Amino acid sequence: MADEPTPVDPGADTLASSRPDASGALRAFLDGLIRPSGPALIGSVTVAASIIIGSALLVTPDRLAALDPSWFPRGPDRLTHETFRVRRAPAEPLGVAIVGASSLGRAVPRRILAEALEERLGRPVPVRSLTSGGLTLRGSSAVVDAIDQQVGGVIIVGVNPTSLGVRDDHIHHELRAGPVGLESDVLREEAKRAGVRLPRRVGVFAIDASGFLLSSVVHQIDGGHDGGPKVRLAPRALAARLAGKARSVDVALARFLERPERSLDVLARMVERTRWATEARIVLLESFWNPRLEEAVDDAALTAYQDHLRRFAASHDVTYLDLDREAGLADEDFADPIHLLAREASWRRVGDLLADRLAPALRERAAELEAGRDR
């Protein structure tokens, strides 16, 4: 029997012809996406304007200050957040602020110093810690400028050869990822003086501080890190780190001593601005070093550097403290060349020593405040 012909669906051609062509649809979509047109331009401008206006309204220093500190796990991010918090908080006429590199924050924990000062003054003394790894003198100046009207007791500014002997062009990094977002007119003025090109600002915090905001998000995801190791380095690693740090300190000392006025003028401007803004006393506190580091650096250069700081302090009526040897810290107290281990005994030794030096100025300041109330 002959095969019967296969029935033909009369609608097959119609269905096939009406089936969408995927590649053609994609081409049509892309063509419409990139083809210039009035509605597309208006839509793009509207979206961009909405983002800018929304950022300006929602992402501000005050709103960031209200966030929990856990959102800012890394040193520079945490410093920026704490700076915003201090600026937003009521002024503390007898307050103390610690401003400097992470090694200073590790050597003088806020809690330890606050307890030591309360023991000596018989009253609570609010202490703020504004420290971060690698904070230079210019960065510290920007932080001090941001908080000086809020702190009326003592402002401790950490100094060390590395922070005073930093290269001029390092300020470019500080402007882009600086300690106070990109809000610091002090940093911009110092950049002009150093002949460093300034990054352009648009006047919207969320855009100008986008580097800081992005790094905060990244560090929130990866957990961030703080300055220096938390445990003592192995002997070989510590020896290598000491040798490397001694070389970098010697380079910084040579750079500072070549033109000491370059850094001392920055320091002088910070002192002058602070005196206009607050009655707080200024204390320059030298970093605490592993004694093996001090043995390794150029002794003559280090002595010359310290002499410059002492003369500056005397001529500008500020206090310069180098408590390193008096604190009696040993090699085993340090995790690396400059960071103290988290040991209560070491902290107490440093905190008590510093509190003894700060207490007279704070008593004098407290007496001035009392006399002012009696008038």
Image (cartoon, rainbow, N blue to C red):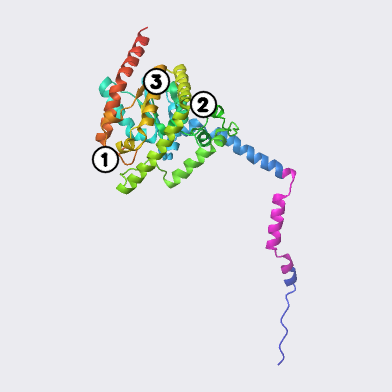
* Residue underneath mark 3: 311
In space, the residues marked 2 and 3 are separated at their CA atoms by 24 Å
The residue range painted magenta reads: 15-39
Amino acid type at mark 2: Val
Amino acid type at mark 3: Arg
* Residue underneath mark 1: 332
Disc 2, SS: helix
Residue displayed at 42% across by 40% down: 74
Dot 1 or dot 2, earlier in sequence:
2
Residue displayed at 26% across by 30% down: 349
Amino acid type at mark 1: Glu
Q: Nearer the viewer, residue 162 or 200?
A: 162
In space, the residues marked 1 and 2 are separated at their CA atoms by 39 Å
In space, the residues marked 1 and 3 are separated at their CA atoms by 33 Å
Mark 2 neighbour density, 10 Å: few (under 14) some (14–19) many (20 or more): many
143 to the left or right of 285: right
